[in-house]
Amino acid sequence: MNRKPSRTWKKGSCHCGAVTFEVRTGPEVELVDCNCSMCHRTGYLHLIVPKSDFRLLTGKRKLTSYTFNTKTAKHTFCSVCGVKSFYVPRSHPDGWSVNFRCLDPKDFASVITIEFDGQNWENNVTKLSPLESA
């Protein structure tokens, strides 16, 4: 019998700690390294999860948002330190993209990173994995 490893809540935060959150994942994750204009400039590594696997702990009032282009993605930033720890991605508007760099890598047994050509988003978005349900 093939059994998935249990998923647990892992804590994350922005740089200054004003915004804290948890994301529920297994010990093995697949990240997306996108080369679009936003991700390339910020070094964002996407860990995309369903909305049910994300919870904001502190800092709701410290968050500010930014949208551009199609206005589908809702980019959220800590208004104190400017770090984007998570946001609603255009590719998965029913989920969250968590910046893996805002989590403790020691909480993970295996991390695989796939490259995504976000500069040509429309031609490549179907190559992204769908959200996994619990």
Image (cartoon, rainbow, N blue to C red):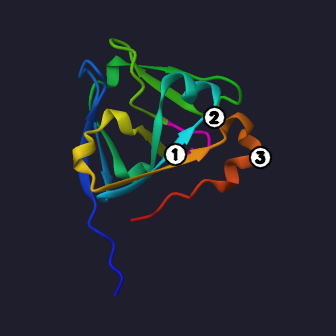
**As rendered, which of 94 and 17 lies closer to the eye?**
17
Look at the picture and state if 77 lies above or below 5: above
Instruction: Identify the mark at residue 32; answer none if there is no mark.
Output: 1
Helix, strand or loop under label 1: strand
Task: Tell me which secondary structure the magenta stretch mostly adopts.
Answer: loop
Q: Say which residue appears at 29% left-offset and 38% top-offset.
A: 103
The residue type indicated by label 1 comes to: Val
Look at the picture and state if 19 lies above or below 7: above
Q: Could you say where residue 66 lies in the image, as x and y percent from the top left? A: 55, 20
**As rendered, which of 104 and 94 lies closer to the eye?**
104
**As rendered, which of 94 and 130 lies closer to the eye?**
130
The boundaries of the magenta stretch are 88-93
Determine whether label 3 and label 2 are within 8 Å by CB.
no
Instruction: Identify the mark at residue 72; answer none if there is no mark.
Output: 2
The N terminus: image quadrant: bottom left
- The question of residue 91 being in magenta is answered with yes
Look at the picture and state if 57 lies above or below 63: below
- On the rendered structure, is 116 left or right of 98? right
Helix, strand or loop under label 2: loop
Q: How many marks?
A: 3
Q: Say which residue appears at 33% left-offset and 72% top-offset.
A: 4
Compare marks 1 and 2 and give the one earlier in the sequence.
1
The C terminus: image quadrant: bottom left
Helix, strand or loop under label 3: helix
Residue 129, picture quadrant: bottom right
Compare marks 3 and 1 and give the one earlier in the sequence.
1
Look at the picture and state if 27 lies above or below 43: below
Residue holding disc 3: 123
